Amino acid sequence: MPETLVVQAELAELERVRVWADALAQRLDLPQSASFAIHLCFEEAVSNIARHGFIGERGETGTNRDVHLALERDSDTVTMTIEDRGVAFDPLSVPAPSAPTTISDAAVGGLGISLMRHFAQHLAYEREDGTNRLTLRFDLTKQAE
Amino acid sequence: MEMKIETLADDITKVNLEGRLDILGAQQIDLHFNVIVASQRKVIVDLEQVLFLASMGIRTLIIGAKTVKLKGGRMVLLRPSADVHKVLTAMGTDTVIPIVHDLEAAISAVSG
């Protein structure tokens, strides 16, 4: 049974997400590196939604800024789900910035999605009935490396 | 996120960061950090007390390093934790901003 939290799509809610994720990591007995990866992905996903997901009348409802978070552990797999009713946006369609070779060409944008791709072993996006759903899976055996 | 500044010998500025360098942490220090990197040529950013690093924190560090370089200076990152280091290497930040693990190496790296 997943553990769930509903927050508003606002940066000020990130602290509440952190506290919830902290407690959950302990309850689920997650190794420290996995806990860090999961915290990071929650931070990136929720802050993206808060900053870009509801832009005036372009949001699907304009008023429902709920972001539904869920986390579930099944043996060595942790599944994270983030759902919102903001503008349709598939983060997986954003091309990853190329690896920098000098500080001058180092990108400062698009890093959040790259981090999620790096720290989660599987990502999936779907849009259904006006809801964005991002699913990330973490293999605890790989996080431990 | 807290930021404390130390001035070392030879006009080296050591920026000691403490806390979470997430989007809220980056917002807290951006203004002051930008003032430092715009005015100093030898900058050591001590990450030993940074518990968490996310994309907006990386952005702050990269912009800082770009600014210092544009002015002919050098910036290095000092003593990131294992998890913070993983974030830096995941983004290739370690290939464009030197990461060192002791102060002597940091001083040497910014002194050129």
Image (cartoon, coloured by chain):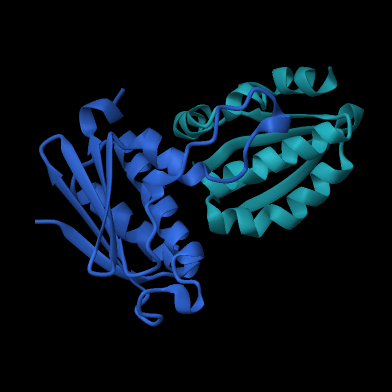
Chain colours: A blue, B cyan
Instruction: Identify the residue at image location x=76%, y=19%.
Output: B109
Q: Is residue A71 left or right of residue B99?
A: left
- Residue B33 in the figure: left or right of residue A99: right
Which image quadrant: the N terminus of chain B? bottom right
Q: Is residue A87 above or below residue B75?
A: below
Q: Is residue B7 visible?
A: yes
Q: Residue at x 87, y 39 (%)?
A: B40
Residue A130 drawn at (x, y percent): 28, 69
Residue ID at (64%, 59%): B28
Picture coordinates of residue A43, whole percent (x, y):
42, 53
**Quadrant in which residue A138 is drawn:** top left
Left or right of A78 in this view: A115: right
Give how far across and how far down residue A81 sits, in percent: 25, 54
Most foreground residue, B62 or A75: B62
Write down the quadrant of residue A132 in the picture.
bottom left
Quadrant of the drawing holding the C terminus of chain B: top right
Residue at the spot 24% in from the left edge and 48% down from the top edge: A26
Q: Is residue B21 above or below residue A67?
A: above
Answer with the quarter of the image where residue B27 lies: bottom right
Looking at the image, the residue that sits furthest to the bottom is A63
Between A45 and B84, the one lying in front of the other is: A45
Q: Nearer the viewer, residue A74 or A53?
A: A53
Q: Nearer the viewer, residue A91 or A8?
A: A91
Q: Is residue A110 left or right of residue A84?
A: right
Q: Is residue B19 visible?
A: no
Numbered circles on residues, count: 0
